[in-house]
Amino acid sequence: MSDHAAYIGWELSSSNHHGSEGASGPDRISHFEIVGRLGTGGMGDVYRARDEVLDREVALKLVRPEVAQDEEVRQRFLREARLAAAINHSGVATLFEAGETEPVENGGKPQLYLASELVEGQNLEGVLRNEPLPIERVIDLGVQLAEALAAAHELGIVHRDIKPSNLMVTDGGQLKVLDFGIAKRVGWAGVQGDDAETLTYTARGAIVGTPAYMAPEQVAGGVADARTDIHGAGCVLYQMLTGRGPFGSGAPSEVMRRVIVTPPKPLRTLRAEVPQPLADVVERALAKDPGDRYQTAEELATALRGAAASTGVRHALRGIGAPVPRRTILTAAVVVVVVLSVLVGRKIFSTALPFDNRDWLLVADVVNETGDEGFTLALKSALETDLRQSRHVNIFDEGRVRNTLKMMRRDPADTIDLETGLHVCRFAGVRALLVPRIDAVGDVYILQASLIEPETGRIADRIRLTANGRDEVLLETIDALTEQVRHRLGESMQSIAETDAPLIQYTTSSWEALRLLAIGSKEWRARRYEAAARSFELALEQDPHFAMARGSLGLLEFQFLGKPEEGRQLLAEALEDASDVSRREYLLLRAINRQFVDDDPDAALADYRLISELYPDALQPYNNSGRILQRLGRYEEATRMYERAHEIDPRNPIPLFNQWFTLNQYLRRPAAAYEVARELVELQPESPWARHGLAWSLVALRRFDDAEAGMRAILESDPSFSYALANLAHLLYRRGAFDEAVDLYRKMDAESHASERIDSDAFDSLCLGLALQGAGRADEARTVLEAEIDALRAQSVSNPLEDFERERQAGLLAAVGRGREASALARKIEAEDPDDPQVLLALAEVYALIGEPDHAIALLGRAFDAGYDDPYYVLLDPPLRGLQNRPELEQLAPPS
């Protein structure tokens, strides 16, 4: 049962306690004899009972058996008892005893019970009867209430449901606070352990209390503290003075909306005789922002006494006229100055938690209580995007989170709730966790964010803002929230002002466009590129000037969807639309344009260098610079860029893949590449690409048996991974395991013919024919090879063969034993002086098959000089098997 539904307490009915309703319920419980029924609380009944041991009457609360079987309820009950029993003040009903009854003989369940002071009199609700009280009595009861609350607050106990029906007035005029059933101990400075505020409770964000008397932070599901009770006391004071509550009545949702946004009617418009000082006290107690209220109940009591003194009703307050020694006044003044100095110092010079420049912040998934699913992705994306403007705060973004979850052996698609967020932060060394939440009461939206210190799980700060309407959240409130987050993490106001462009200025004013951008980004990370593109297109339909969506679509089409021209056009248009985007987004978009659209590598490198200076923990400028330098043949510099990118984000596999490729393919340092591949596999043990990189490094190091074992392991977990399939077949062929190689080549040949890729068809048929020959199945080999030659010849009737098709035809002719035809065709192609490294490799294969190894080696050298970028493939290439012991081949593909 949630706190929304009920609470444990001993709230009494509004009738006079003397007029009991009769002895319904149990006659006896433990050593208590039931005398009569007093009323009903949230989870049980309240009885007048006699304690036979101490010979006194008590109020006995029995929790209904069916409710008490819930272990959570039992724990809450015991927690309530500990809280209430801790308070020793004449203004609070005393708790005498709490426990559990003995099981009854017929198998019934034990009952939980509380025995507390029986307060004779009426509750304040009955006293009021919708009529105002005399001003003197209001002040007297108000001071008593504030003093009782101060006693509880001193122990860190907050009532959270101050209202007339929870306040008893004895026949002698003394006020007693009842029902600490939803009370909660808050964590004052230095308080830890079970009684401190815990994340378990605050994470639920349960709205606890009675709507007409709740504080705005309660309506928003936030944390209650002493100022929450002060707001409740303000509601009671208002009702005592006017006979009506400050926020009226009606549907709970409407009342809660008024609590958040509607100021109460001024007291003096309802009751002109209310002194202005007293009206000021009540108005301050009812302030919407807790920071604008009295900060302690003692302050409220002092303010009420001051109002009484200034209005000539001092006689209404017992002891108000007693003189205060001058030394006490001076001492108090010194204490106040010291306390204020400490508080101001903390406010100005301290951050909410230890957070240094460029520390990491993780934004958890949004706790969305609005019923509008559109907020869930869009709000998180907006918060991260807005916070990313900061040069003080580093956002531990979605990619980093997913890579960390993989290292933790967790599902990378896990929801980043409070618990998972804390685990990720602790694993990755993230300094702060931000848990955003959005609620709605009518057309009012409450946006709040909790800053949590991951190591301790302590809520270091909570920020709460409201917005009138859905659009205002995007137009104003997110900006205000992120500005406060940045400031509370220690960023200077000057820095914030310099890098705090309005969110909608550089993104979009459309919630739906923002949501679609977030969906597209998730699809991209999952390598579902077509789906990502469609989401970006839909975002642009919502907002045709959304530069981030247009730029994302352009980069996606350029890099992954085989539409380079369309991609370039979109990137250029995005840059034109980006005049108002944040500095970070603009520089990145300009650098990408210079890299891919303008083909100006020097200008792109300069832009990336500037971004890295401004945002030294950004991954993209280093990784993209590495790609440019790699294309320019500056491989050593490229490797250093990838190393720096890896230092920035050690859990991101992309810089490692790029570094491995450069070391292996261009610098031909297989030992160094092997170490990078090992790190990749440690980072992503389930990735076939990472494991294939490691196996390929083993090929380069001539550890062929280990490489074969690695390829087999990949195929066991992912039988469709074509690279491992082909290279395992090549490894088997190399060591003479022809029959097993035949099976794999036959599978590859069938798949390539089904895909109708002629170049793959011909080469796979060539490999299959060679393996069949090696296995002594010459007739089968001839059938396969001749069939492929006939297919190429038939193709040439309608269309001239492309270069790769002519080379493959020559290789097939050589393999089938038609060496003269193969030689003639190869020499004809060679006479055209090709400079394509793939053509030169294919010609080398032909000459190796027809028995001209020296010529084959020379052509391989030309292929490498022309830029052939897979040097270690020659160690496995089936047509080159006859060259594999030649020292010249070793020089082309060095092992170290």
Image (cartoon, grey):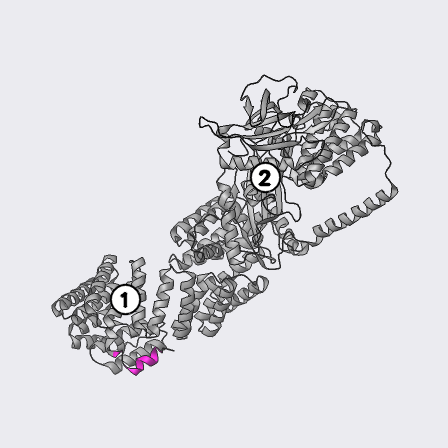
Q: Tell me if residue 888 is in the magenta stretch.
A: yes
The amino acid sitting under disc 1 is Leu
Mark 1 vs mark 2, foreground winner is 1
Q: Vertical placement of 581 versus 825: above or below? A: above
Give the SS element for disc 2. strand
Left-right relation of 641 to 175: left
Residues under labels 1 and 2: Cα distance? 59 Å
Residue 786 location in percent, x, y? 15, 67
Q: Which residue is mark 2?
A: 446
Closer to the camera, 547 or 266? 266
Kindly indicate whether the residue at mark 2 contacts the one at mark 1 (C-beta within 8 angstroms): no
Magenta residues? Answer: 883-894
Q: Could you say which quadrant of the image residue 61 lies in?
A: top right
Q: Could you say which quadrant of the image residue 868 lies in?
A: bottom left
Residue 755 numbered tag: none
Q: Vertical placement of 2 versus 337: above or below? A: above
Q: Tell me if residue 605 is in the magenta stretch.
A: no
Q: Which residue is mark 1?
A: 728
Taking the view exactly as shown, the residue that stands out farthest to the left is 779
Q: Is residue 828 visible?
A: no
Residue 635 location in percent, x, y? 45, 73
Closer to the camera, 378 or 174? 174
Residue 67 location in percent, x, y? 50, 30
Which quarter of the rendering shows the C terminus? bottom left
Closer to the camera, 288 or 608? 288
Closer to the camera, 198 or 552? 198
The amino acid sitting under disc 2 is Ile
Which residue shows up at 64% across the image and 32% down it? 95
Which residue shows up at 31% across the image and 65% down it? 711
Q: Vertical placement of 158 versus 655: above or below? A: above
Left-right relation of 722 to 188: left
Left-right relation of 621 to 284: left
